[in-house]
Amino acid sequence: MELIQVGRVGRPHGLKGELKLKVEEQYEEDLLVATAVLIGQPPIPFFLESARGGGALIVKLEGFDQREAVAMLSNQDVYLPADQLTAGPAEVQHPFLQLVGYTIKAAGYPDLGPIEEVMDLPQHYLAQLTHEDKEVLIPLHEDLILEQQDGERLLLMQLPEGLLG
C-alpha cells in the first residue's frame, strides 16, 4: 500500500483529546471523509472518531479522550493511502517547506524546534517555532544552513547573535 504524506499533526486542541492537523489544501476533503489516518514514523493507523474543518482541521481519534494522551503525536507526519486520495501528490511550494518538523542546532543557541511552519515572504523564508513559550522566527537562507540531516530531521545552521532576544 502506497502512503502519501498529506500534512503534520499540530498541537492538542481543547481538553478532550482533539488534535489540530496542518493538512495540504488539496487533501483536506479526503481527510474529512477518511475513517483512519496513519501518523508517525513508522506510520501507525489511528481511527477517526470525528473530523471537522473551518480554518484548521480538528480531529478526534478513537480511544484518546485527554489532551495529554494526544500530545505525544504532535509534530508527526500524517499519511493517507494513495488510493483514498482524489488529488495527486503535492508539488513543493518552496524549497524550505520540507523542513517543517526539523530541529535547528546552531552554535551559541539551545536546540530550537521543531519548526512548526515555514513562512514564504516576498524577500526571504522564515522558520516559525516555539521556544520557551514564545513564538520565534528564524531566517532560512542557503548561506545560513551548514548541513541538513534528513534522517535525524536536524538542520545545522550558522545564526547571527541575538535572535532569541
Image (cartoon, helix red, strand yellow):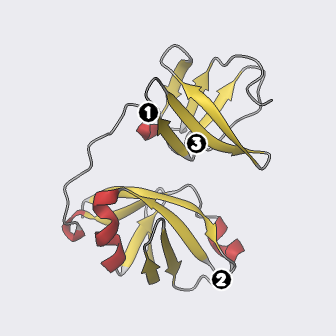
Q: Which amino acid does label 1 sit on?
A: Phe
Please say if 18 is above or below 99: below
Sooner in the amino-acid sequence: mark 1 or mark 3:
1
Q: Nearer the viewer, residue 61 or 119?
A: 119
Residue under the image location 48 percent in, 25 percent down = 124
Label 3 residue SS: loop
Residue 138's place in the image compared with 162, above or below, is: below
> Can you identify the residue that label 3 sits on?
115
Q: What residue type is labelled 2?
A: Lys
The front one of 128 and 110 is 128
Residue drawn at x 54%, y 32% as measured from the top left: 126
- Count the numbered circles shown: 3
Q: Do the residues labelled 1 and 2 touch (CB within 8 Å)?
A: no
Left/right placement of residue 4 relative to residue 64 reads left
Q: Where is residue 14 drawn, in percent x and y? A: 66, 76
Residue 30: which quarter of the image?
Answer: bottom left
Q: Which of marks 1 and 2 is nearer the N terminus?
A: 2
Quadrant showing the N terminus: bottom left
Badge 3 amino acid = Ile
Q: Position of residue 110 (x, y in %)?
A: 77, 32
**Label 2 Cα crowd, 10 Å radius (few <14 / some 14-19 / many 20+):** some
Q: In which quarter of the image is residue 97?
A: top left
Q: Are marks 2 and 3 in contact (CB under 8 Å)?
A: no
Circle on res. 61: none
Q: Position of residue 111 (x, y in %)?
A: 72, 35
Label 2: which secondary element: loop
Residue 33: x percent and y percent?
31, 79
- Lower sequence index among marks 2 and 3: 2
Residue at which label 2 appears: 16
CA separation in Å, label 1 and label 2: 34 Å
Q: Mark 1 points at which residue?
A: 96
